[in-house]
Image (spheres, grey):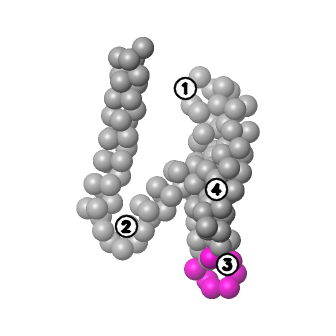
Amino acid sequence: MKQAFLVFLGGGLGSVLRYLISRPLNPLFQNFFLGTFLVNMIGCLLIGFVLGISAKGNLLSSNGALFLATGFCGGFTTFSAFAFEKHHLLRNGELLNFALYMLSSVGIGILAVVLGLWLAKSIS
């Protein structure tokens, strides 16, 4: 239960920070969501750092890593987990799985958004 609370707390903090960064920055450019882009890149940097120091041993507790990587980064951006998972596949030489997962995640994700919008439109 403690671990679930750590994820909950970190996720809430990450979500609020994402909102505070994205809200003022996204409107700056018409066709580029600067706030979202920065959040995603910062999240990738942070999850790499957190999981990197966590792997070194006693620099970060498992609860600290759970709070920061799963909770905070998960609330801040799920793109960070996506990028870390792709790195894992590449590091292990799984090029076909990397390509399939990357293409299907992006392609099916976009199709799912389109389907969700269509479903919402059909019930209104």
Vertically, is 11 above or below 55? above
Mark carried by residue 31: 1
Q: Residue 61: which disc?
A: 3
In which quadrant is the C terminus drawn? top left
Query: Does any portion of residue 41 appear in the rendered image?
Result: no
In the image, what residue type sits under mark 4? Phe
Q: Nearer the viewer, mark 2 or mark 1?
A: 2
Question: Are dots 1 and 3 in contact, CB under 8 Å?
Answer: no
- Is residue 101 at all visible to an observer of this figure? yes
Report if the CB atoms under discs 4 and 1 are less than 8 Å apart.
no
Q: Which residues are magenta?
A: 55-62
| Distance from Cα at disc 2 to Cα at disc 4 | 28 Å
| Mark 2 or 3, nearer chain start | 3
Question: Relative to residue 112, is residue 99 depicted above or below?
Answer: below
Of mark 1 and mark 3, the one earlier in the sequence is: 1
Pointer 4 and pointer 3: residues touching (CB < 8 Å)?
A: no
Q: Which mark is residue 89?
A: 2
Q: Earlier in the sequence, mark 2 or mark 1?
A: 1
